[in-house]
Amino acid sequence: MSLDKIRNFSIIAHIDHGKSTLADRLLEVTGTVEKRNMRNQVLDTMDLERERGITIKAQAIRMEYEGYTLNLIDTPGHVDFSYEVSRSLAACEGTLLLVDASQGIEAQTLANAYLAIQNNLVIIPVVNKIDLPNSDPEKIIEELKNVFGIKREEVILASAKEGTGAKEILDAIINRIPPPQGREDAPLQALIFDSQYDSYRGVVAFLKVVNGQIKTGTKIKMLGTDNEYDALEIGTLKLGLNPRGILNTGEVGYLVTGIKNVREFHVGDTVTNVLNPAKEALPGYNPIKPMVFCGFYPTNAGDFPHLKDALEKLQLNDAALTFETESSAALGFGFRCGFLGLLHLEIIQERLEREYNLELVATAPSVIYKIIKTNHEEILVDNPASFPEAQTIEHIEEPYLKLTVLTPSEYVGKVMELANDKRGIFISLEYLDVTRVMLTYEIPLSEVIAEFHDLLKSVSRGYASMDYELIGYKESDLVKLDILLNQEPVDALSVIIHREKAHYKGKLLAEKLKEVLPRHQFEVPIQAAIGSKVVARETKPAIRKDVLQKCYGGDITRKKKLLEKQKAGKKRMKMIGNVEVPQDAFMAVLRLGK
Amino acid sequence: MKNNTISPQPTTHNQTHNPEPITHPLSLYLHIPFCKKKCNYCDFVSFAGKENLIDDYVNTLCDEITFQLTTYNLPFTTVYFGGGTPTLLKPEHFKQILSAISSHYLPCRQAGALPITRLEISIEANPGTVNEKYLAELRKFGINRISIGAQSFNNQHLKYLGRIHNEQDIFNAVKDAKAAGFKNINLDLMFCLPNQTMEEWKDDLSKALSLNPTHLSTYNLQFEKNTPLYKDKDKDKDKNEDREDLDADMFEYTIKTLKENGFDHYEISNFAKPGFECQHNIIYWKNGDYLGVGCGAHSHLNGERWENTSSLNDYILKKKVSSKQIADTRKETIFMGLRLLDGIGQNKFAGFEKEVDDLIGQGLLEKSGNNIKLTGKGLMLANIVFERFI
């Protein structure tokens, strides 16, 4: 296959704008997948993905059409995954920019389109879902012109569901997207843009051969780590791994070296030939930094090794997930886990519970705080429980985001109210067109990860969309709110919160804890405090009566079982000092914290 | 060993024959599972509208009595007719049953070899089903203790509970029982009903006391699955803090008031004038042996427990009973025995010395002579104490 017959492209779009359906249609039209083998949205292989209607893992598929080889590299579509998007865009020369004809440009469309422009990709604009009754393609074409300067004649109208426009899209891919630029005779330089763990093959690296070529049996070297491996298996991706023996310049495919640890292959690294190595690496990537953290603790202490095992397995395919052991006086041994965002966190939690059958307590999500101490030392803390003493802190800085919200103009007031409430700083307001507004705010990450997205949807009846990027740290008047039970602090419940909200939050937490705590043989004071200052207090009264009133001959077996059950229930308690806290009490309080 | 039964052997027990004759006091319990109507809170083995089966039931019952008493050589010291509503049976039925019992009665030497007429023979009675004449007949056959299911003197509460009687019926039943010659009279009462106030409970107690019973049993309402009242369980104490406090208040008031009125608080829920404690139930609490006959009846004998089928038809047709289980004697002795407020001997706590010391330290148990018993505080938190021994 000569270089100029290859096209590498991706599809970027906002969630639900029809990316997966379009991908399905292209696969069908090119004959890559036969109609009878077509399951809806072939590319979303994980159940979770299908359920949530999102793509989590980037996948690649090779199609043949009219003598050309078209490599479709699928991209994830959610705020948490911009890192994954940029990786796969680097393997492409062009991208389809998909916009829903009834929704218009949304925040992710914008974000990903900018990414594509940054990567110098050719953009093919596609207006999708024109089959829907309330679609307004004209309006969208207008938007595309206003926002991106896209000309009317460049836009392709399509309905992925019905197949309209599929052929035009394929033709556009061939005609408008350039073939990969690279030299067949140059030393091998291949960019690893993703990796996956296969239980038979070990780590499978997805790569694009920029220069030179790679064959099975080649001794290869990673320019970033200087490690050498054998290319055991080389092939293309076509709904699965297709061993081919060779990948030529410009081609996208996979490499198997037999290594088992996915962290040995750094995404963004360059593969080259040991015998004729390239001098320089291709432009790579910044290592991904987790933005959101939480603690995962097994409900049953005995499940700790099982949780560790599960996290290790998940990490095999998810280099963005980080974790390390931590312990809590309240919850025992667990892990501090780092995620790209709240969705990433929720997905991992759900996978742990569902695929690995683990019962977990998750602590409230937290961000990384920068603490400047009175002795001028600067430390980073991601766990409220490890905050230093209040008197040693000079000031605290927290990560801020640039938040972009796209909303119909009738909800602007409510959206602005929400952003203000969450300590957002107004930056700008622009009209995308007569009916839609783009708002930009600077806002603390900690306010966004809590429940911002859900609230945004609810104040805008679901019409608003958001995107964000990290812009750095700013100083904030933050305090650590502690919860004390019978004078003992419960480390797992500590939260970092803005001073103004501390009283309100403290009251909420104390009330909830009072509700879920069982009565003890003594009165239990429940306090929320900042340092030594109590900001809220509730009291759980002592137990007055716990008696089996009736027990005669026929009751003995049954009542004994009842007592056994009660006793077993108490085993699932965590002791905080001499207060017994049931597992679901933690859950109830922590849920409130989210 | 007598074995002159004329009906097919109930396949109730795979038993080694010629077991040791039991010489310690033993109770005989008879279950009469018929009711006019099921009360809204009831999860006992009882059936409404099956009175046509009473004759057959009594026949089978007598067969079982005969079989059991001859198989086991059982001397017993108390007899108890429980239900359901035993007082739905006609006097002739009692005649038939008590004949079967007396013709196989072996006086228990250890218990003083009482003639059958001197045993405590109790019957549970529903106030809506008795009158003086009926009760006099029962008295004639030897029944000498009556436990009247009053539950409440408040007609609205009675309605809520689904009882078939009203307040006046209770007064009448007690009057009739006394007139019929009963001297040993118990009233059952329920407290902590949803919407029941402290005043209403005080009123119930005072009415009960005015009738001069020799025994009172007081229970708080339990919401059981598969009963009509289960829908109200959210109003229950464990879901409502003020109901929790009211439950405790009512119980404390009950204990105080009955003590002041000359009742001996001898078991968690049972109060008696001196000498009128229920001997039958004491055998349960002392983890003694008892034989239960009838549909759904439980037995505890030779270190084993078993129960008869709770299907009325299966019982009458003498079909299989549930299998025996080995009794967990040590634990059961403790958690049943501590219900008796005089406590039980220290030697019964062998192996639980640490738990006992802990509980004494917490002020929930105390030593009294050779016994260990619940303290006043322990009485209120009895479950917490019992759990330690399970």
Image (tube, helix red, strand yellow):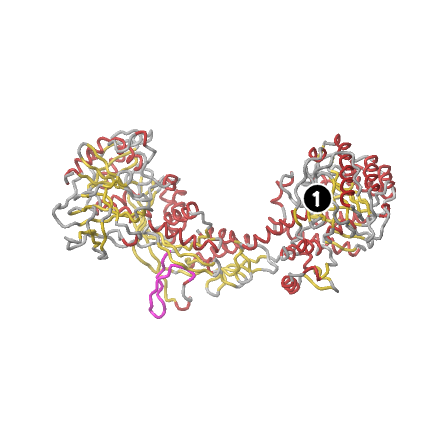
Packing grade of label 1 (10 A; few <14, some 14-19, many >=20) is few
Question: Is A211 included in the stretch rendered in magenta?
Answer: no
Q: Which x, y percent locates residue A73? A: 25, 41
| Residue B216 seen in the figure | no
Q: Which of A365 and A554 is in front in this view?
A: A554
- Residue B92 vs residue A162, the one in the foreground: B92
**In terms of image quadrants, where is residue B297?**
top right
A83 on left or right of A328: left
| Residue A284 percent coordinates (x, y) | 22, 52
Nearer to me, B11 or B146: B11
Q: Which amino acid does label 1 sit on?
A: Gln
Q: How many labels does the image show?
A: 1
Above or below, comparing residue A327 to residue A453 in the picture: below
At which x and y percent is residue A321? 35, 52
What is the chain letter for disc 1? B
Horizontal side of A116 relative to A506 (left or right) equals left
Place residue B69 in its image quadrant.
top right
Question: Is residue A29 in view from this perspective?
Answer: yes
Secondary structure of the residue carrying tag 1 is: loop
Residue located beneath label 1 in the image: B15
Q: Is A371 one of the magenta-colored residues?
A: yes
In this image, B260 relative to A250: left or right?
Answer: right
Identify the residue at the far bottom of this view. Answer: A375
Residue stretch rendered in magenta on the structure:
A367-385
Residue B57 on image: x %, y % = 75, 34
- Of residues A428 and A555, the one drawn nearer to the viewer in this rendering: A555
- B92 is higher (above) or lower (below) than B121: above
Q: In which quarter of the image is the N terminus of chain A?
A: top left
